Amino acid sequence: MPLVSMRQLLDEAAKGGYGVGAFNVNDMEQIQAIMSAAKETRSPVIVQASRGARQFAQDLYLFKLIQAAAELNPEIPIAMHQDHGNSFETCKSAIELGYTSVMMDGSLKEDGKTPASFAENVAVTKKVVEFAHDRGVTVEGEIGVLGGVEDGHGAGGSGLDHITDPDQAVEFAELTGVDALAIAIGTSHGAYKFTKKPDGSVLKMDVLIAIHKRLPNTHLVMHGSSSVPKDLQDVINQYGGKLKETWGVPVEEIQLGIRNGVRKINVDTDNRLAITGAIRKVFAETPEKFDPRDYLKPAREAMQKVVAQRMTQFGQAGHAGDYKAVSIAEIAKGYKDGSLSTQPLVAAK
Ligand code: 13P
């Protein structure tokens, strides 16, 4: 199957009432781990690359690897997504490479650190939507600001600093025509999200539910959604790591989100933890080994396990064969003739 539009993938997820994990990649082993998990669980999947990942791997290496994944797994719908585009130019370059989806994170200025005004966010996101939709490419926007930093991108601080205002979310969706909307509900990127198991005072699921009530057909996106499971932390610390005690987003909360319009769930940290734990274990238990395959293979397997588990928990498992890819050219036509809506359904308060 060729790479599919993320819009198609999320529309199908909405029909089926499930969520789709969006997993970050930097290298071949991570892509292979995701594809093995998708094959194992028969899941459609979103693979995403941050600006940092594109720089680390170089654009062409990374994109050709994704094309290889699509060729080798024709039965799996795959959307290739730019995570946290900081500018029109970043999104444009991803679209020109062949990404089928981009995130324009206009919640921050182009430096990827300073919160932007609502008007700035709307203007740059709208510009990306026009360019992307003309070419059949999906756009995710963000309203509210996430906490933490990922690959150098992020306002830092707590996820509670800039929680999304539901009225602004409605206005933003109407003004920009985005296909998916990332909202800030208290999560942050990285391993250190919460200093205790998150309850209602730190994870604002009530805000998410309020936004879904107002925008019942809009695909919502949860960033910073690693669960940072204790068993993955323990492996790292058992083999010489020094992670401080921390909590992530409980899977049950993500499942509550999925019942309330969340269709894309971003996960990076859990996979990083699984990889690092597996490598540390090999180094500690068999220090005489020096062939990278001796530690990259278990690392890849550890990531596959986490991804397959999330795919099952998010409900995307078993849905790979539900539909055929609509070509990106057809999707572009859909945006033009209005058969693919860009205006959200808005419910009264
Ligand atoms: P985590 O750090 O929680 O995995 O979040 C990743 C993410 O949101 C990527 O955009």
Image (cartoon, rainbow, N blue to C red):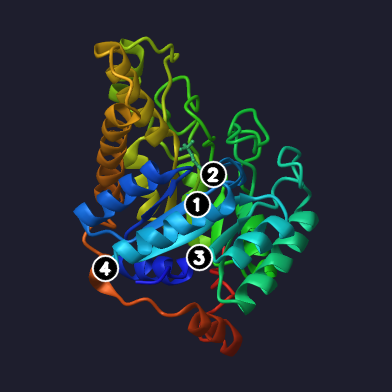
Residue 210 visible in rendering:
no
Within 10 angstroms of label 4, few (less than 14), some, or many (20 or more) residues? many
Res 75 label: 4
Q: Secondary structure at mark 2?
A: helix
154 vs 331: above or below:
above
* Marks 1 and 2 close (CB-CB < 8 Å): yes
| Residue topped by disc 2 | 57
Instruction: Identify the residue at horizontal 79%, vertical 49% (top origin).
Output: 117
Q: Specify the amino acid type for callout 1.
A: Leu
Res 13 label: none
155 vs 65: above or below:
above
Q: CA distance from mark 2 to mark 3?
A: 33 Å
Res 62 label: 1
| Residue topped by disc 3 | 218
- Whether label 2 lies within 8 Å of ligand 1 gets the answer no
Q: Secondary structure at mark 3?
A: loop
Labels 4, 3: front one: 4
- Whether label 1 lies within 8 Å of ligand 1 gets the answer no
Q: Specify the amino acid type for callout 4.
A: Glu
Of mark 2 and mark 3, the one earlier in the sequence is 2
Left or right of 121 in this view: 331: left
Of mark 4 and mark 3, the one earlier in the sequence is 4
Q: Specify the amino acid type for callout 3.
A: Thr
Instruction: Identify the residue at horizontal 43%, vertical 70% (top origin).
Output: 4
